[in-house]
Image (cartoon, rainbow, N blue to C red):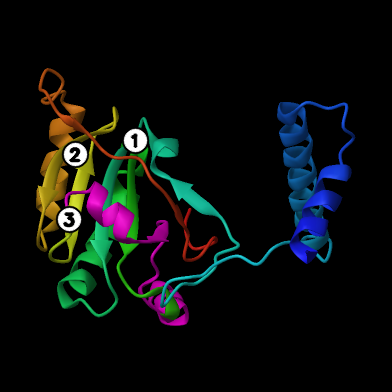
Amino acid sequence: MGQKHHKKVQQEEIPAQFSEKQKKWIKGGIFIAIILGLFIVNNLDGEPDNGPYPPGYLEFSGSTLKLSDYQGKIIILDFWATWCAPCRKAIPELIELGNEYEDKGVQVIGITMDDTDQKSNVEKFIDEFEIDYPVVWGNESIIYKYGGIQTIPTSFIIDKNGKVISRYNEYVPKETYENDIKDILSGKFNNRELVNAPDFELPLVKENNFR
């Protein structure tokens, strides 16, 4: 008996002059309005929380670096870490290259593979080694884009058109980079089929360490 009475009330809530199809549309509209109202109420107290975040995540509020902003320059892209002995050997030579070939359009960019929760250690390392080129945080996406980074240092030489002309999966002496730079400047690779360097935008470790 109670069930029959409930059904009767539900039917009388919508005037009889509406067809069954119209009644369904009205009920659907009421349902959507309720959902929208709940959504608005739940967000009146401020911005919704972000997340969840992966382990070791560090939220960056500073500037980022885009590789495409450096098109027109010869890029030495260096994947490194503070705990890597060959990287420590290579970095002073990269600093020299950036200074000596600045007027030729050479730009060094470092991508650190250190965990983001080591931010203070990386900043201290940059200061200690007097790194004067931009250093950004690496992530799984950039590793994937560049074919997987199995060892460090791993470096790429990118010409002024954004093409990768060399990849080195180990420490290489300064003279090797110089030869690549000279080959690019001489036009050696102008008529060769080369792969585009994948673009990226990554957060800077320090905003004021580079020229």
**In which quadrant is the N terminus drawn?**
bottom right
Q: Give residue 181's mark.
A: 2
Q: Residue furthest top?
A: 191
Which residue is found at the position 88% from the left and 26% from the top? 17
Comparing 172 with 116, the one in front is 116
Q: Mark 1 or 2 closer to N-term?
A: 1
In terms of secondary structure, where does tag 2 sit? Answer: helix
For badge 1, the amino acid type reads Lys
Instruction: Please rate how many residues cluster around mark 2, counting C-alpha atoms within 10 Å: few if below 14, some from 14 to 19, many from 20.
Output: many
- Residue 68 magenta: no
Disc 3 target residue: 148
Q: Is residue 38 above or below residue 183?
A: below
Q: Is residue 177 above or below residue 22?
A: below
Comparing 124 with 19, the one in front is 19
In terms of secondary structure, where does tag 3 sit? Answer: loop
Disc 1 target residue: 73
Q: Mark 3 or 2 closer to N-term?
A: 3
Residue 185 occupies which quadrant of the picture?
top left
Comparing 100 with 155, the one in front is 155
Residue 90 location in percent, x, y?
20, 65
The residues colored magenta run: 118-147
Residue 202 location in percent, x, y?
43, 54
For badge 3, the amino acid type reads Gly
